Amino acid sequence: MPSSTMVKAVVSTPPHPLAGEMVPPTLFDLLVPLVFVYPAPTPSKEALKVGLSRAVAAYPHLAGRLAVDQRGRRSIHVNNEGMLVIEDAMAVDLASVVLVDAGVVADLGALYPRLLTPEIKLTRYSCGGLVIGLAFHHKVMDGTALDDFLSTWAMAVRQGTDFTAPSPFLDRGILTAVDPTTPVFDHGSIEFKGPSDALVPTCNRKTIKLSFTSEFMAELKARVGAPCTTFQCMLTHMWKKTTQARGVKPEEFTQVRVAGGRQLPGQGRTSRAVRLVRQHGVDGDYICSFLDFGAMADAEGQELMATAPAAGTMCCPNLEVDSWLRFGYHQVDFGGGPPSPFLFPNIPAEGIMVFWPSLLEKGGVDVMIALAEDHLTPFQQICYSFDTIPEV
């Protein structure tokens, strides 16, 4: 039977500056689950929980609770109520659990918690292997903060009593709107939406994992014919291959939404897609506009609803991409080496994909994408093939 423990942060002297405060959540509304798989040897549950209590001391809002401040706004009460750690044990070897079979990712729902507060699930196997499942909400922390926190937790476990907590930058005051607020982009239809009775298409989907080698990436970039980043090149390739597998006609309009903002319109040509990805990135002006929009909505008492695709829906012929290429999730080492594998489970809607650095080699890229079952076979037949890409 699974057991649970509430792990509270080690109380420091003097107390953390945020202790007792009401911290505003971010505007993003997304639950992010992660699954890390570690073969033996792995640290004990006591070492993991002690390290967690030391790491949370540097990130006290993770041990807080959702609340409402004096103005009636949703907030995070930094009250050190603790992080829930669920422990489970399986009477089988980790090697007998097939997490990825022929590129198709298994249902990993039992390996991570599903509530809004930050939670961790530890599943121990008879061989000594360990699966760590996490669920963090974007209203509490973004990907960069989560990356820093996981590195801190792993360091606390490795170093034990020699661990010294870092001082991460937690001041959300820098993310404030200008006065007067002047949003210049249409965030109301890009990141947020109003109530709608419109029917949303659904489909049977499967999540697959792809691994592109460093040689593949070097060749792909060389074929573009102009300088481009790994993200720009990978997105262009995936956009083209999914469009082909879905049977989208060259003249049909499609778009890609980059997590965190912009929508990129296109009509099939890879060279055009590369230019769009390069020209429409999320820059400082876009972020300032987004903050202004959020401040205006807060002043007017609006309840913003994220435009992230609802679970089970179908984005086709469009896509949504989230880049973790600059994060170190694939390197989180609790003392026995990095995870093998690291997975983003349960992609909730068809057409969503996530990029991160390869677990196997520097310069490679791993991709997870959810596709309709009808499109899966044609996509897998062409996803590792090259096309001639005109110069841009």
Image (cartoon, rainbow, N blue to C red):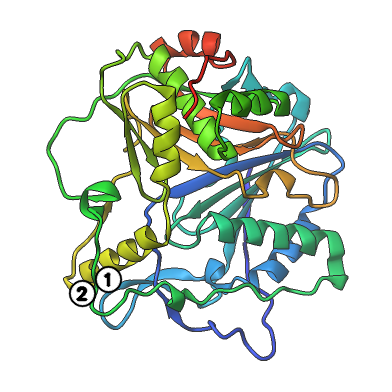
Label number found at residue 356: none
The residue positioned 80% from the left and 34% from the top of the image is 126
Marks 2/1 in contact by CB < 8 Å: the verdict is yes
Circle 2 residues within 10 Å: few <14, some 14–19, many ≥20: few
What is the crowding at mark 1: few (fewer than 14 residues within 10 Å), some, or many (at least 20)? Answer: many
Q: Which residue matches tag 2? A: 299
Tell me if residue 241 comes above or below residue 271 in the rendering.
Answer: above
Residue 97 versus residue 114 in the image, above or below: above
Q: Which residue occupies the foreground of this view, 362 or 16?
A: 362
In depth, the one of 283 and 65 nearer the eye is 283
The residue located at (87%, 72%) in the rendering is: 162
What is the x, y in percent for residue 18? 53, 82
The x, y position of residue 186, in whole percent, is: 22, 53
Residue named by callout 1: 295
Residue, far left:
197
Residue toward you, 222 or 136: 222
Corner quadrant of residue 256:
top left
Does 286 sit left or right of 184 as displayed? Answer: right
Q: In the rendered image of this protein, does residue 19 appear above or below residue 234?
A: below
Q: For the residues marked 2 and 1, what is the alpha-carbon distance in whole angstroms?
A: 6 Å
Q: Quadrant of residue 69?
A: bottom left
Q: Would residue 129 be seen by someone viewing this image from the given angle?
A: yes
Horizontal and vertical percent position of residue 16: 61, 84
Residue at 66% x, 91% y: name it: 14
Residue type at numbered disc 2: Ala
The residue lying at 85 percent from left, 66 percent from top is 160
Name the residue type under label 1. Answer: Ala
Observer able to see residue 27 = no
Which residue is situated farthest in the bottom direction here?
14
